[in-house]
Image (spheres, grey):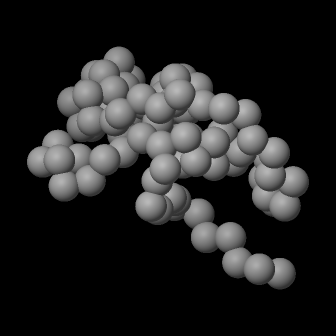
Amino acid sequence: MAANQQITIFASEDLLSELESSLARSKLQSKIQFLGATVQILVSRTRQLVQLSPVTPVDVPQLRDQDDVKIIAVALAANADFIVSLFCHSPE
């Protein structure tokens, strides 16, 4: 969808660096090799698909995981309509 410009994906340099570090973990190497790819190829392709957004620090004390502040900051800077996540945080 991003490749067809049906959606726009925003990221920051910090998020792309985190992606690269995560993909470099040994537990993912067999899956990446199975795809016939490398970490560099996947990060490069991701860079082609995202629009970099400047980030202004934000304070969101109610977040359960303060590491997510950088995601909120990108979304706010990009005036995003949605945040898509693999994790479901339900109210306690």
Q: Residue furthest top?
A: 40
Q: Residue at x 27, y 35 (%)?
A: 49
Q: Residue at x 34, y 35 (%)?
A: 50
Q: How many marks?
A: 0
Q: Residue furthest bottom?
A: 92
Q: Position of residue 52 (x, y in %)?
A: 42, 29
Q: Is residue 70 visible?
A: yes
Please state which of residues 21 and 67 is positioned toward the viewer in this rendering: 67
Q: Residue furthest right?
A: 61
Q: Position of residue 10 (x, y in %)?
A: 42, 41
Q: Is residue 47 left or right of residue 14?
A: left
**Quarter of the rendering occupied by the C terminus:** bottom right
Q: Residue furthest left?
A: 4
Please state which of residues 57 and 2 is positioned toward the viewer in this rendering: 57
Please state which of residues 63 and 34 is positioned toward the viewer in this rendering: 63
Q: Position of residue 80 (x, y in %)?
A: 46, 53
Vertical position of residue 61 compared to residue 50: above or below: below
Among the 4 quarters of the image, the one containing residue 89: bottom right
Q: Residue at x 54, y 48 (%)?
A: 75
Q: Is residue 42 visible?
A: no
Please state which of residues 79 and 71 is positioned toward the viewer in this rendering: 79
Q: Residue at x 79, y 58 (%)?
A: 63
